[in-house]
Image (tube, grey):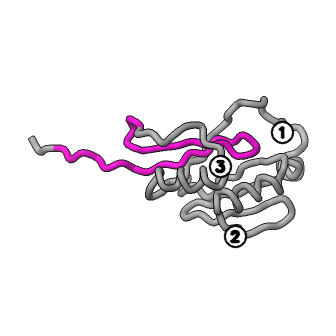
Amino acid sequence: MFCYLGYVVLFVEDFDGALAFYRDKVGLAVRFHDKGYAELAVAGSKFALLARSRLPELVGAAHTGRPATGTHEAGVTFLVEDVDRIHRDLSGRGVPFLGAPQDRPWGQRTAYFQDPEGHLIEIATNLPRPRRSAT
């Protein structure tokens, strides 16, 4: 049915501010930019920003409401080689983390930050899995 995840698109009020955050603070290169839309350079699926003002032309005005302030509708996870190094690097650039990296019971070391629009972004490193004995 579905083959693969092609895009993650964040809808943003302040397109220029969000683009500057991901480009200048997070350090993602811009692959494509045109009229309130930008694709940022990541491996795998595409990660993009879309000005919320463009939503009516895509889905109609009746379906363009904004979620309540402070709520998280979804999260975006970027897998990285060393979450602690990336945490230090991004913190040094002014990225506002919600806490220090932590080992999680699902086998990853993670840290979370919010972009200027309040989107919850996770960086994660897969932890080595213990070898199972053949008994």
At horizontal 90% and vertical 42% (from top left) the residue drawn is 61
At horizontal 64% and vertical 41% (from top left) the residue drawn is 120
Residues 37 and 55: in front is 37
Percent coordinates x, y for residue 102 in the rendering: 44, 39
CA distance separating discs 2 and 1: 28 Å
Percent coordinates x, y for residue 19 in the rendering: 76, 58
Whether pointer 3 and pointer 1 mark residues with C-beta atoms closer than 8 Å, the reply is no
In this view, which residue lies farthest toward the left?
Answer: 135
Percent coordinates x, y for residue 79 in the rendering: 49, 54
The three-letter amino acid code for the residue at tag 3 is Val
Residues 68 and 95: in front is 95
Whether residue 40 sits left or right of residue 126 in the image: it is right
- Quick check: is 51 in the magenta stretch? no
The three-letter amino acid code for the residue at tag 2 is Arg
Residue at mark 2: 31
At horizontal 71% and vertical 61% (from top left) the residue drawn is 24
Neighbour class for label 3 at 10 Å: few (<14), some, many (≥20)?
some
Q: Which residues are magenta?
A: 104-132
Neighbour class for label 1 at 10 Å: few (<14), some, many (≥20)?
few
Circle 1 sits in a helix, a strand or a loop, which is it? Answer: helix
Whether residue 65 sits left or right of residue 23 in the image: it is right
Residue 95 is marked as: 3
